[in-house]
Amino acid sequence: MKKNIKMAILVAFLGVFVACSSESTPTYSELGSDNYPQKFYVEYVPCTYGANWSPEAFNQDMLPGWQELLVEVDSTIVAAYGLTYEGEKPEDAPGDGFWQLIWNSKADADAGWETWESYEKTADWSESTADILACGTKAETFSFDAYVRRDGNALGAFNLESFSSDYQQCLYNEGQGSSELIAVIDQFEEWIESSDSSIYAPYSYVVLAPDYEDEEVDLFWGNFNQNAELREAGNAYFLKTGTDIQDAFDKVMTCEDPIDYVTGEIPLT
């Protein structure tokens, strides 16, 4: 769906437009409102496969230790997911995929990382499992304020064991900003409500505002489908029935091509 914005496009994780001046670019905090609230704080930790990587090794030899450590540090992580590239990994990718962490707030994330990185056992666990999967530190993590308009399961419940996600990196066009984006999202929501969602459901989306400085990114637009087939069906349907909305998105921002991921929940317990 709103992912075919043919201009720039979110990338490897969450990018953004070619920027205009700070005077004309609203801050991300302006996205927050009763109609378009910030729901959570999300982080993407880049990870690289080790020599002994396999899903079995991760589940049997790595995951249990992580779950035990979450209890020991009294973690406030709300949810976690693993993302791997659906197709060929981009040349500039920071790793083979990401360990996604969902928090209720930036404050929770900062406190959680401080406790995690100061706890001796976490370093031992990371070192002992690096031959399976080696992941970055807080300093290497991509962090975002996440904004959503609708409940993630509003168009049907997802099977979180494995689903499709894609992200486009975007920049606001000159003179455009969050107010204009929200207005187009209003139109997109109307399209969703009137569409034949049986073609592409379940479906959800998120707007990610980077909590770091990057002149090449204003936001990432993320789409979620159950699988690649439903994603492509939804894209084709949107191209036939939502061209006016796509044109409106293109007026507000320029996005790179989406990067597709196979995503799955990482259980906390």
Image (cartoon, rainbow, N blue to C red):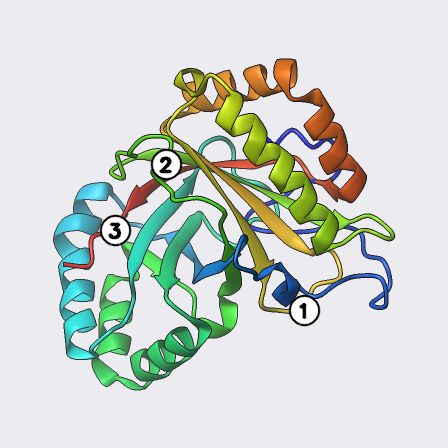
Q: Identify residue for label 2.
A: 154
Q: Are the residues tagged 1 and 3 within 8 Å (C-beta)?
A: no
Task: Look at the numbered disc 1 and give the secondary structure of its residue.
Answer: loop
**Residue 20 x, y percent position in the rendering:** 85, 58
How far, Cα to Cα, is label 2 from label 1?
33 Å
Q: Is residue 46 left or right of residue 124?
A: right
Answer with the quarter of the image where residue 28 lies.
bottom right
Check disc 3 and give the amino acid type.
Ile
* Nearest to the observer: residue 195 or residue 77: 195
Task: Look at the numbered disc 3 and give the secondary structure of its residue.
Answer: loop
Check disc 1 and give the amino acid type.
Glu
The mark closer to the camera, 2 or 1, is 2
Residue drawn at x 15%, y 73% is: 71
Q: Residues within 10 Å of mark 1 (few under 14, many from 20)?
A: few
**Residue 256 x, y percent position in the rendering:** 69, 39
Q: Identify residue for label 3.
A: 266
* Nearest to the observer: residue 131 or residue 6: 6
* Nearest to the observer: residue 217 or residue 93: 217
Q: Identify residue for label 1.
A: 213
Q: Is residue 76 above or below residue 263?
A: below
Task: Look at the numbered disc 2 and give the secondary structure of its residue.
Answer: loop
**Residue 154 x, y percent position in the rendering:** 37, 36
The mark closer to the camera, 2 or 3, is 2
* Nearest to the observer: residue 124 or residue 140: 140
Q: Is residue 261 above or below residue 93?
A: above
Q: Which numbered disc, 2 or 3, marks the residue that appears first in the sequence?
A: 2
Q: Is residue 266 left or right of residue 29?
A: left
